[in-house]
Every structure is written in structure tokens, then in C-alpha cells.
């Protein structure tokens, strides 16, 4: 699906629940529903939106389709570099599986049954978010040495690999050192994951630059099959897993405007809400503006 097809496919109403499928639901995450189809898993991205680890009562129409289509694009672009979780002949297999639910196809992936690694692979090129907080507190990037005198959103000398734990529901990902990562995965597997992550990030940086964007940071996830072979899984270089900034508005020393749900976070910060369940409803304008940001990112990233 190219960017024009994606824009025309945007629904007027958010799809928050996936019902009516003849498959066993094995997991319901903040955004994705996972079904067991026998030989494979069916991943369907809803339009749910979470902020501060709380799923909000309102979704963003078409968000699940946007995330899925960007990931599918990158799985195709990187398949010569690393195997990914999509089943063989993915388009045909998915169309056959969902022939009675064709409206779900644009937001779905049919994937191999792999074992996810217990670590998220985070790559950072700019100081922002939790990375900036770490720098302010310790003068390091989660223990990694970086130059002194940097500002919020400053560029780092080179992309840096800052892995985290993979948190369970209701918990937060926690940064871990390279030594801890080696203990968790084994030294060889850890460095394999780091190497692929840096190479994938470099491709994302080039694509972002061509689109007039800055890819500040991103996270990748990997899994293994029964043989222990490594696969790229989950989502790739989407606005949910990555921090994209408009290059023409970039100015270090302050937080940047991101093409993601930051607009929602900023709105929620103005409310008298304790950031626990249930979350507040979103005004229609906040929903519309957030959808526009996701869609703009997709239109810049995907082929036209």
C-alpha cells in the first residue's frame, strides 16, 4: 500500500476492538491483538492509543493501518539483510486467511511462531526523552560515555546502542548495560543484535533524511526460531517505535515536535489526571491532530 492508498483508506472511526474472528485470541496488548491460526500467529493492530502506560478510551482512526503498512514496507526493504517474521507469500496467505474479513487486511500481519528475545534493541542518535533525563542526572547515556555540555535534543557523535529490558504489562522498560545484555542473550547473540540494529537504524536515517525528517531514536525487536536463527519481528521504524522530527524545525536546546502521540501526551499534561486507569477522553481536535501527524509521517516514509 503506497501513501496515496493509505490516505484514502483512513476510516472515520477508530477500531478499538477486534471481534468476530474464528481464531483463538492468545494475547491482547495495548495496540495489537494476537490470534493463533495453527501454523502462524495473526497480528492485528487496533487503533487504540496508550499514554503513560494507560490505554485511553478514544483511539486514533487508522493508526493501526498506518503502523502496519510502514512495518510491511520496512520488512520488504530489509529482507535481504535479515530474515523477518512474515510467513512466506505473506500477501496471498493473509488475503486467503482474512477473505471474510477483508477490512482487517491493511492492519494485519501473518507471522511465524518465533520466540521473542527478552530485550528491546534501542538505537539513539539524539538526546531526548529518557536518554536526556539520564544525561541530566548522570552525565552519561545510561552509563555510556558521551560529550559534556550537550543540550536537550543534541545530536550524539554517533548512533549509540542502549538496550532495555522487555517489560511486562503495567511495567516500564528498564535500560541495561552492554554487559547485562551479554549476560541476558549471550555475548555472540547480543553483538549480532547490536550489529543488525545499527545497520537497520542507518537505513532509517537515510530514508528519514530524504523525507525531510530526523530519526532521533528507535527500537527494534528480534526473535528466534527452533534452530536459534535470528529474525526481525514486531514493528519497524514506525512513529510508535521511533522518534521522528521535522528537520526544518530542528533546534537543539528544547524538546522537538514528534510525528507520534506526543501531541496527546502534551494535552494530557494540562489535565488534572494522575496518569492511572481510566484515562480521560480526548477532544475531537486532539484526535484529528494526532491522526494527521501519524498520516503525515506515513506519507513521508512510504512510496508515493
Image: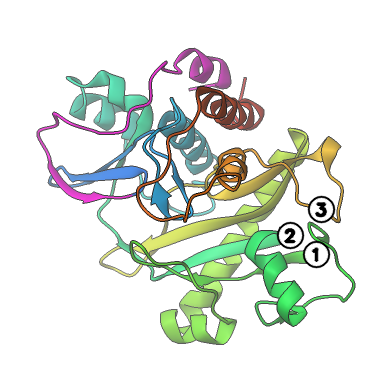
Please say if 287 is above or below 137.
Answer: above
Is 71 a magenta residue?
no
Tell me how far mark 1 sits from mark 2, CA to CA: 5 Å
Q: Residue 296 appears at what percent x and percent y?
A: 63, 27
Q: Name the residue under label 2.
A: 125
Q: Can residue 106 be seen in this view?
A: yes
Write the residue at 25% across / 31% down: 93
Which circle, 2 or 3, is nearer the viewer?
A: 3
- Residue pictured at 17% horizontal, 19% vertical: 100
Q: Which numbered disc covers residue 254?
A: 3
- In-front residue for pair 257/95: 257
Circles 1 and 2 in contact, beta carbons < 8 Å: yes
Q: Tell me where residue 217 appears, x and y as whole percent.
A: 65, 55
Q: Give the range drawn in magenta.
A: 1-29
Q: Residue drawn at (80%, 76%), measured in percent from left and top?
A: 146
Quarter of image, res 37: top left
Residue extending farthest right: 149
- Judge from the rendering whether residue 112 lies leftward or rightward of residue 135; answer left or right: left
Indicate the secondary structure of the residue bearing disc 2.
Answer: strand
**In the picture shown, does residue 46 fall above or below 98?**
below
Q: Which residue is drawn at 57% across and 69% down?
A: 194
Amino acid at each position: 500500500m503506497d501513501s496515496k492508498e493509505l490516505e484514502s483508506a483512513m476510516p472515520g472511526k477508530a477500531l478499538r476492538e477486534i471481534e468476530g474472528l474464528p481464531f483463538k485470541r492468545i494475547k491482547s496488548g495495548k495496540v495489537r491483538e494476537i490470534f493463533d491460526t495453527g501454523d502462524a500467529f495473526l497480528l492485528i493492530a487496533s487503533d487504540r492509543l496508550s499514554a503513560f502506560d494507560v490505554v485511553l478510551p478514544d483511539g486514533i482512526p487508522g493508526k493501526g493501518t498506518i503502523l502496519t503498512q510502514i512495518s510491511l514496507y520496512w520488512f520488504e526493504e530489509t529482507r535481504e539483510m535479515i530474515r523477518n517474521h512474515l510467513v512466506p507469500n505473506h500477501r496471498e496467505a493473509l488475503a486467503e486467511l482474512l477473505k471474510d474479513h477483508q477490512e482487517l487486511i491493511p492492519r494485519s500481519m501473518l507471522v511465524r511462531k518465533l520466540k521473542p528475545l527478552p530485550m528491546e534493541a534501542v538505537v539513539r542518535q539524539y538526546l531526548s526523552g529518557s536518554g536526556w533525563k539520564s544525561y541530566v542526572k548522570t552525565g552519561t547515556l545510561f552509563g555510556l560515555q558521551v560529550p559534556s555540555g550537550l543540550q536537550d535534543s543534541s545530536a550524539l557523535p554517533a548512533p549509540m546502542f542502549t538496550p532495555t529490558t522487555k517489560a511486562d504489562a503495567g511495567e516500564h522498560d528498564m535500560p541495561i548495560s552492554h554487559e547485562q545484555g551479554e549476560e541476558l542473550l549471550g555475548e555472540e547473540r547480543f553483538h549480532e543484535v547490536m550489529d543488525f540494529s545499527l545497520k537497520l537504524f542507518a537505513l532509517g536515517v537515510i530514508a528519514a533524511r530524504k523525507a525531510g525528517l530526523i530519526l532521533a531514536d528507535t527500537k527494534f525487536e528480534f526473535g528466534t526460531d527452533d534452530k536459534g536463527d535470528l529474525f526481525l519481528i514486531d514493528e519497524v521504524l514506525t512513529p510508535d517505535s521511533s522518534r521522528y522530527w521535522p528537520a526544518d524545525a530542528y533546534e537543539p536546546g528544547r524538546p522537538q515536535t514528534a510525528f507520534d502521540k506526543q501531541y496527546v501526551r502534551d494535552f494530557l499534561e494540562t489535565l488534572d489526571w494522575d496518569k492511572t486507569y481510566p484515562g480521560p477522553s480526548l477532544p475531537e481536535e486532539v484526535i484529528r491532530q494526532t491522526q494527521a501527524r501519524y498520516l503525515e509521517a506515513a506519507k513521508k516514509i512510504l512510496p508515493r
